[in-house]
Image (tube, rainbow, N blue to C red):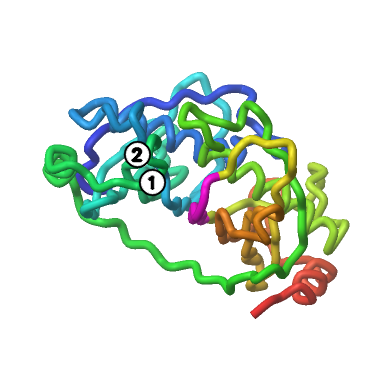
Amino acid sequence: MQHPVTTLDVPIRWTDLDLQGHVNNSLVVEYLQEARSGLMSAGPNRHLVSSGVVVVGHVVEYVRPILFSETPLRAEVGVYDVGAARFHVQYELFQEGQLCARASSTLCPFDFEANRPRRLTAAERDWFVQVAGPAPEQRELAVPALQGRGHVHPFTVRWGDVDRYGHVNNVRHFDYLQVARIAATTAADSSMARDGGQTRWVVARQDVDYVGQISHRPEPYAVHTAVARVGTTSYTLAAEIVDPLAGGEVLARARTVQVCTDRDGKKKELPASTREALTGLLIS
């Protein structure tokens, strides 16, 4: 990253590890949130952390696994593309000097009393513009709209999923998508079950666009998941989080690239049964 505004440490918790022995992909987004909060809190726009700023979208590239260590990750965080009502944050996460993840987030200030986005004030925008650097190069990951198609996985919001703003925190969306993704792929091919076997499924990239707010309630929401592309060693999924009580209103859209690897993390070709199962679920 060029011209990082803030370099800070992000600690790793033992409980951040998943069945595959490295930090789960959803926890990486939580690290980004910690780094972003550190960036915001270090300058004159620190009030945005407490008074209201919402994430509009994430683009996350997972470069290498993050392992448990008592030594914190080093996060380099910067601002770019500052507009009238939104701004962007870019990140790079390093472990022992090696790049583990790069990402960007689109954010906008939000008036929670009026329940609507607002424009940046002149002072807020001026500081962001002063510290802004160049935009990162990012390849668009395009997938078809699902329009009600795909595997359907219901989920219930937990009380602890809700943040200080009174709605589900943006990080928790990655949890919902992950559970639905595993359910959809395992239903398509039972050999894709995440059982710690010889074949591992590693997330290489994940993009999420936040369209509406998810609130705590007893009635479930749902994730629709479908296959958008099947490659030699990877496949791409499209997903939408919807509200069944509102006629299937879309609250978030996601794109996920997963890579087939062996136990050592080396890429390998998709098994024939998996390729056949995923190809049968392709949408256009």
Q: Which quarter of the image is occupied by the C terminus?
A: bottom right
Along the viewing direction, whichever of 119 and 186 lies nearer the viewer: 119
Residue indicated by mark 2: 111
Cα distance in 3D space between marks 1 and 2? 5 Å
Which residue sits furthest bottom? Answer: 284
Amino acid on which disc 1 is placed: Arg
As drawn, the residue found furthest toward the front would be 114
Q: Which residue is mark 1?
A: 116
Q: Secondary structure at mark 1?
A: strand
Residue 27 placement, left or right of 57: right
Q: Amino acid at mark 2?
A: Asp
- Sequence-wise, the earlier of marks 1 and 2 is 2
**Residue name at image x 25 percent, y 48 percent:** 119
Quadrant position of residue 152:
bottom right
Q: Residue at x 62, y 66 (%)?
A: 236
Q: In percent of the image, x 47 and y 33: which residue is there?
A: 31
Q: Is residue 18 above or below residue 80?
A: above
Point 37% across, 40% down: residue: 114
Please state if 45 lies on the left or on the right of 69 as rendered.
left
Q: Farthest residue in the top direction? A: 70
Badges 1 and 2: C-beta atoms under 8 Å apart? yes
Residue 233 shown in magenta: no
| Residue 270 appears in the rendering | yes
Does the magenta run of residues contain 212?
yes
Please report the bounds of the magenta region as a residue range. 207-213
Task: Find residue 248 and report its horizontal and vertical position in percent.
Answer: 67, 60
Q: Residues within 10 Å of mark 1 (few under 14, many from 20)?
A: few
